[in-house]
Image (tube, helix red, strand yellow):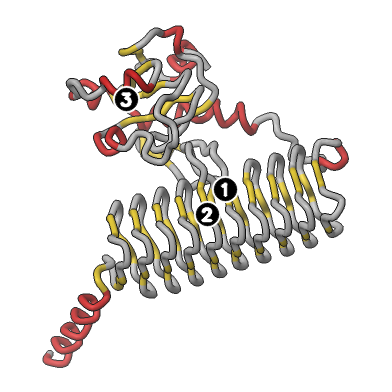
Amino acid sequence: MNFKDLQQLDSSFNICFGQETSVEVSSISHSYEPSDDSFIFIKNKKFLNEIGRLSKKKTYSNSGVVFEKKFFDSLKDETSQLEKQFDWFGTVEDVNRAMCAFSKPFYDQKYGSLNYFVDGRQMGTAQVDPSAQIAQNVFIGENCKIGKDVHIYPGSVILPNVEIGEGTIIFPNITIYPFVTVGMNCRIHAGTSIGTDGFGYNFIAGEHVKIWHLAGVEISDDVEIGASSKIDGGAFIPTRIGKGTKIDNLVQISHNVQVGAHNIFAGKSGIAGSVETEEYCIFAASAGSAPGARIGRGSQIAPLAIISENAVIAPGSVLGGHPARPLKDWLKSQAKLRQLIKKN
């Protein structure tokens, strides 16, 4: 899409650095992990300060930044480094509105031409290793890649552009949405859905307006996912599950979540959007996190505890309660509460 295409979607879109002719992009990416041939949204200082935090690259070709105009106007000399990294900057009056408007045509471009109705094996586009064992009543979409010794049990639906690594077992009645990659030697249990549309909306003019999710899910090797769990696809960055992570039944992992290696999620735990966990974190039964939290290596979250939005949890923390706080402090507060109840 070029400058005129984007301006038709949001008439407030204007270029403030670079040339209009420089705007020629194929997707939207995330400020934490920009990519070539795309643009990112920057609404406030938080996202400005963390541009490229998860990226291995320092510069991004054929790429740009869309700022909220009020925030961009407040900046002084804080964009000089960005001018070396990106080809252009643009502004819009309302990033939330632009995010909804701009994401829809990119979603249509990526997903609109997919064939959901004819098995990729019939079309000749699915690559299935001869050693894979696939039951009857399994749908495998176009351009899927099924590795060596993969087992797919009855009733599963593997939608287009999915990759499943060697030795992975897909138990019955699993749905894997497009643009999901599953690593080697994973086990995914019955009724689970992976890559479902992220639950992302912006409240505009009295309505909840959809943010269209483009980025899918990446599951590393040796991951096990219990029955009836859900992992949502990312909006502009993939939802990622780290190597060796074990997920129990009835667990919700939301869009954009970045799960480190060897995490544990017990039954009914729930992780809201854009949470990041480092290695060896443990969420006990029905524990959870509000959006945007960052949880340090080896942290343990007690049953029913809820981490607050955008909280930063130090490595090795042991937390309980709501809002989650050091477990010893929470236990003391519970004991004090019981004493007060007895007195009354």
Of mark 1 and mark 2, the one earlier in the sequence is: 1
Given contact means CB atoms under 8 Å apart, are the residues at marks 1 and 2 in contact?
yes
Of the 4 image quadrants, the one containing the C terminus is: bottom left
The numbered mark at residue 241 is 2
Q: At 39% across and 38% down in the image, what residue appears?
A: 32
| Total numbered labels | 3
Q: Which residue is mark 3?
A: 67
Residue 196 appears in view: no
Say which amino acid is labelled 2: Ile
Eye-nearest disc, 3 or 1: 1
Of mark 3 and mark 1, the one earlier in the sequence is: 3
The answer to which of 240 and 94 lies nearer the viewer is 240
Q: At 57% across and 62% down in the image, what residue appears?
A: 229
Q: Which percent across, then down, holds residue 145?
A: 75, 44
Say which amino acid is labelled 1: Glu
Q: Which residue is mark 1?
A: 218
Farthest bottom residue in view: 342
